[in-house]
Amino acid sequence: QPGGDPRATKILFGRYELGRLLGCGAFAKVYHARNLSTGQSVAIKVISKSRVLRSGLTPNLRREILALRRLRHPHVIRLHEVLASRSHIFFVMDLARGGELFTFIANSHRLSEPIARLLFHQLISALSFCHSRGVFHRDLKPENLLLAEDSTTNPFLKISDFGLSACLAPSTPNPLLSTVCGTPAYVAPEVLSRNPYSGAAVDLWSCGVILFVLIAGYLPFNDPNLMNLYRKIRRGEVRFPRWVSPDLRRLISRLLDINPQTRLTLDGVLTDPWFRKDLDEQKLIA
Ligand code: ADP
Ligand code: MG
């Protein structure tokens, strides 16, 4: 029975051999797999159709997925194909062997500014590429940033789930859903207030949170109580650890601007002094 319950069959559609579980998300399980005709290792994200339907599907799912399959960038996890059985959807994609950026940050305690800058350059180049093609991520966070290889000196970032959140989740956030999914610590204030918002500005806010996490090793907005967390995000006040340079503080503050109209844009990032500084010295430990 091709493409049935992924736990019951080891071979999917006669084409992929399923391997070990790589990770779990709110909606999906991701497995290591091997393409039987090419031998290539891939990652396969398995989503139960009923859960997707419950969270809300966009009407143009098919068209949006076609657009995602055309996105090819070295720092974006490529979507090879989408398969479906009666009960599940399977996203076949590039395998990221280095795991989550989160683990990398945790293992290095915190990153030096040159390494944070290198990763931020990679993130911004992927984001510029996708935004220029009208695709917004809307769910950027370290769990969705993976590393291509297991390397401590030359991290190569790959954004995962690009555009998928826009296809699979309702664009107005449901607070109940957010509670179930975990801490929405990366969400922009205008998303919380449920006003119509710009996908570009929301992604740049998340970039500000990510840049802060890269350099500090912890979240800029954090609270075990969801209402308190929302209040902190809406206020947008950030306290920097003492080791962060003035130039970097300025960049992060301009990204974490609670007003999406005055928030830094991608063009603004590209001309920012901290962003433009040389990438020569790539030391890992601050
Ligand atoms: P969800 O959308 O439900 O959060 P994700 O796509 O983020 O699911 O996948 C969950 C986890 O699986 C990720 O956090 C990561 O650890 C792992 N994972 C996802 N995609 C890949 C991939 N292409 N290569 C390696 N690991 C992956
Ligand atoms: Mg995820």
Image: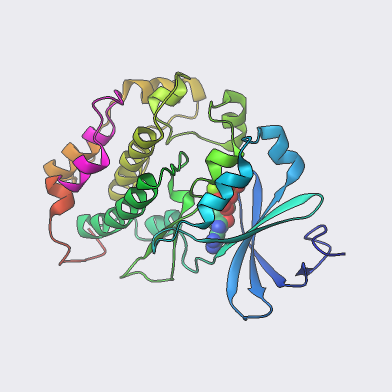
Residue 4 x %, y %: 83, 59
| Quadrant in which the C terminus appears | bottom left
Q: Quadrant of residue 2?
A: bottom right
The location of residue 129, given as percent across then percent down, is 35, 52
Tell me if I can see residue 110 in this picture: no
Ligand 1 falls in quadrant: bottom right
Is 263 magenta? The answer is yes
Q: Is residue 124 magenta?
A: no
Q: Is residue 165 left or right of residue 216?
A: right
Does 181 sit above or below residue 162?
Answer: above
* Residue 247 placement: quadrant: top left
Question: What colouring method underlies this structural image?
Answer: rainbow
In the displayed structure image, the side of residue 189 where residue 111 appears, left or right: left
Res. 208 in view: yes
Q: Percent x, y for residue 165?
A: 54, 41
Q: In this picture, is 153 found above or below 108?
A: below
Write the residue at 40% across / 47% down.
Answer: 133
Quick one: 253 or 61, which is closer to the camera?
A: 61
The residue positioned 77% from the left and 60% from the top of the image is 6
* For residue 133, side relative to residue 282 (left or right): right
x then y, percent, for residue 41: 59, 74
The residue segment tinted magenta is: 253-271
Residue lying at 59% horizontally and 77% vertically, measured from the top left: 40
